[in-house]
Image (cartoon, rainbow, N blue to C red):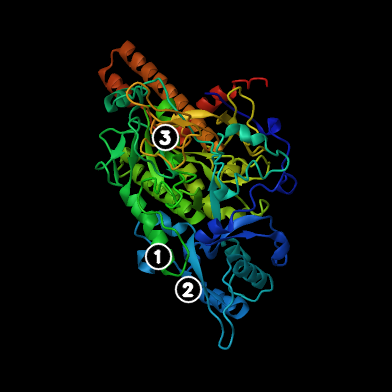
Amino acid sequence: MECYFVSPVDADPSDHDEDSGLGVVTLPLGLLARHGARVLDPSAVSVATDWPTPMSTVYRTRTLLVPPHLQKSPFLEPVNELLTARVGMQLVPARPEQRATDHGPILTVTPVTMVLKSAPQPGQIPQRVDAWTALTALRDAVGRDEMPDIDKSDIQQIGLEHLMIGASLTGSPEIGGTPEIGGTPEIGGTGTGYFSATGDSRIPVQVCLDAPYRPSDDECTHDYGRRPVIAVLDTGVRAHPWLGVERETPGTPGYRTVTDASVQVNLEMQHAIYDTGYWAQQAGDCPRVLIAGPWDVPVTSDPLVGGVSVALGHGTAIAGIFRQALPAATVLSVRIMHSDDIVYEGDLITALNLVSAQVARAQDPAHPRPDLMVDAVSLSCGYFCESAKDMAYTSALKGAIDALLAQGVLVVAAAGNSSVGRRYYPAAFADSPHPDGAPPVCSVGALNPNQSRAVFSDDGCWVTAWASGAMLITTFPTDVNGALQPAVEERANGHHRPTREGLDPDDYRSGFVCWSGTSFAAPALCAWLCQAMLAASAAASAAAAAAAAATATAAAAAAAADDGLKLSGPTVADAMARATHAIACREPRES
């Protein structure tokens, strides 16, 4: 596995989103309808005076992201009066006000989802509910001083809820036959080199290796202070022996993690994500598909056809990369991605806030809980923002990520697979200001096996690192066998001639696949960084122990034994600085 960092001067010079390609700007109508979304067409929408002309993006039509302090008096009443008078809509809180702090105080200071509902005046025909129309009305009104008690800075904190897409190559007609490659005129069909004959980039394979050795808790405590934890916000996981995930009862849809499994789930966190979506749905956000539970389901979104859902196994594959490259770690699997490769921005923000709340409990100086610490977050999804020039458009997501960075949590994000330089968020936050003393977001592009940059990978000055991400071998659920059949099959003829057939393209029961995408480059880079930090921590601990032994001071020796991995606060910045320096010194191989 290879990876390296690049400085801005070495990066692709394309720095202007307007000149760097549109990226993915179309999705099938069925997919948009399923998730209550729409493509923003810059040529067909109004723009408020003194606000930038938008670029194309995909957004959910019935929701806006609004900070909690703007969801009540004295802000909400004049906003709804204006929306009713101008566009026949109103904003409705997505959950009862008394439930707003159920999952910790941090959730009260970050933007959350509000729902738009039709509110026609007497005698008026109900208008089509549309988030961009409502947002434009608010921006125009504050520019005309029609809401004297509301500042422009308030309205700047309100944004669209973007529909985010996973950063793996899928080859599925569900998202336009992989528009990341086939729909990019500059590339034509060259991206098909990463796909099987059926057009799927998930190619079943077999491996001849045992699972990498996983150190025990005692070994991790001795070497590092504790076991590192990586939060993977993705599709969830399914059964695989390497990960310690198995069916709860054979033949049933549920799963469980075994003792000391390398993957763990947090049911309270998953319930909070479901709860947030449920109350948005009850407030009128329909259609909305809820994230129910931590497991990667369903296998197929179309039982009559039986094709494997395009993102099924995505989280399992990412967990497998950590199992190979960072076997000492525990993966905290948090499900936010639907099996059709879609993530709601509001669900991602909720999950990030929940992780941050858990870290805050771990770091509580009065009652520290190191067992709750999360050291890094790996993100393999994103969206194209309508205007990179106005960071207020993405302030909700940026605020959630900045909170984690300020806590000393490493955040690594995939750069996307559209073969463009247009900024893909959250990875593009890598070149934005970040909290003082905190590590920046790491944005990761994908390398081919020969270390050249993969043709599908996004690129630009905002891509700060590159790691192996094309044709990676990793884990896949062992209980998935789709409806496709081998191209050639010869039935068994008695006991002397067993069945002979070609490769079954969607029989994944071997438990391993070859898959491509910046989705997998991000965890590869994250694992590399964390492994470097573990090595630095172990070396520092060994040096301290040796020094203590040399002085023959029992107290110093005991202190050295406790001086393990402290991935929080300034320590993570120091450890990451050492790790990034070591990796950055590696010269990328000449293509």
Secondary structure category for the residue under label 3: loop
Q: Report, in whole angstroms, how far the alpha carbon at label 2 lies from the one at label 3.
A: 54 Å
Judging by the rendered image, the residue that carries numbered circle 2 is: 73
Q: Position of residue 547 (x, y in %)?
A: 36, 14
Amino acid at the residue labelled 2: Ser
Q: Nearer the viewer, residue 430 or 415?
A: 415
- Helix, strand, or loop for circle 2? loop
Residue occupied by mark 3: 508
Position of 499 relative to 173 (above/below)? above
User: Viewer-proximal residue, 554 or 260?
Assistant: 260
**How far is disc 3 from disc 1 in space, using C-alphas?**
37 Å
Percent from the top left, x then y, of residue 181?
64, 41
What is the secondary structure assignment of the residue under circle 1? Answer: helix
Sequence-wise first label, 2 or 3: 2
Instruction: Farthest residue to the bottom: give it.
Output: 123
Where on the picture, by quarter, is residue 31?
bottom right
Mark 1 residue type: Trp
Question: Does 499 sit above or below residue 99?
Answer: above
Res 574 seen here: no
Name which residue lies at 59% across and 55% down: 28
Question: Crowdedness of circle 1 by 10 Å Cα count: few (<14), some, many (20+)?
Answer: some
Tag 1–tag 2 contact (CB < 8 Å): no
- The correct choice, above or below, for 285 with respect to 534 in the image is below
Separation of marks 1 and 2 at Cα, in angstroms: 20 Å
Q: Which mark is nearer the camera, 1 or 2?
A: 1
Q: Where is residue 71 in the image (x, y as percent from the top left)?
A: 48, 68
Q: For the view shown, which residue lies furthest in the front direction?
A: 494
Which residue is at the front of the view, 290 or 396?
290
User: At which x and y percent is residue 285?
Assistant: 47, 66
Residue 13 in view (yes/no)? yes
In the displayed structure image, the side of residue 581 where residue 315 appears, left or right: left
Q: Identify the residue at image location x=73%, y=36%.
A: 13
